[in-house]
Amino acid sequence: MAARFYDPTGARYGVPTFPWRMAPDGLATRRQLRARGLRPGGQDVAAQVLWFSRRYRRKGASPIRVAYLYRLDRAKPVRPMTPAKWAALAKANAAQRVCTECRRDAGYRIPASLGMCVTCADAPQLAA
């Protein structure tokens, strides 16, 4: 099965392709770049990793998963957060803590399934 995804020249898939855990050194996924404090920085995809997943075997969906790889030597450092970005992030997080019913800061992120703080969601049950 792994030989099916081995195409280091890119003749079959259009981009160099490797099976799971067989990518050469010097390439990394977006997540691996981020863990190193890097970002792709506008570079094109250098290669890809393909693997067969039983978890994603659904009707109409392909069970073949893909992860794009980028060159480490062309990656750029992650841009630092500016004060304006920190303020916008704090404001967005605070908005997710305010209850829509009682309008108080719950001190935690309001669950989307409830749409309100746990106290307000449990109030009808406690009253009965």
Image (cartoon, rainbow, N blue to C red):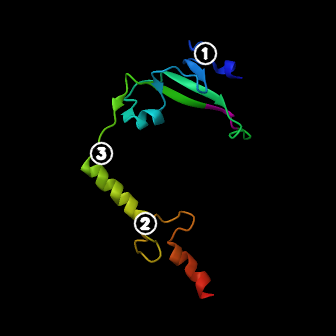
**Residue occupying the point 57% across, 14% down:** 8
Q: Which residues are magenta?
A: 61-65
Q: Is residue 122 left or right of residue 76?
A: right
Position in image of residue 74 (x %, y %): 37, 23
**Residue occupying the point 30% across, 50% down:** 85
Contact (CB < 8 A) between labels 2 and 1?
Answer: no
Instruction: Determine crowd level at label 1: few under 14, some 14-19, many 20+ residues with C-alpha closer than 10 A.
Output: some
Q: Main secondary structure of the magenta part?
A: loop
Position in image of residue 39 (x %, y %): 39, 33
34 and 44: which is toward the camera: 34
Q: Earlier in the sequence, mark 3 or mark 2?
A: 3
Q: Quadrant of residue 43 in the image? A: top left
Q: Is residue 62 located in the magenta-colored stretch of the structure?
A: yes
Residue 29 against residue 125 in the figure, above or below? above
Q: Is residue 86 left or right of residue 96?
A: left
- Residue 97's tag is 2
**Residue occupying the point 50% across, 72% down:** 117
The amino acid marked with disc number 1 is Asp
- Residue 57's tag is none
Instruction: Determine crowd level at label 3: few under 14, some 14-19, many 20+ residues with C-alpha closer than 10 A.
Output: few
Q: Quadrant of the N terminus?
A: top right
Q: Is residue 128 left or right of residue 28?
A: right
Position in image of residue 11 (x %, y %): 59, 12
Q: CA distance from mark 3 to mark 2?
A: 22 Å
Q: Mark 3 — residue? A: 81
Q: CA distance from mark 2 to mark 1?
A: 49 Å
Contact (CB < 8 A) between labels 3 and 2?
Answer: no
Q: Earlier in the sequence, mark 3 or mark 1?
A: 1
The amino acid marked with disc number 3 is Met
Q: Mark 1 — residue? A: 7
Instruction: Determine crowd level at label 2: few under 14, some 14-19, many 20+ residues with C-alpha closer than 10 A.
Output: some
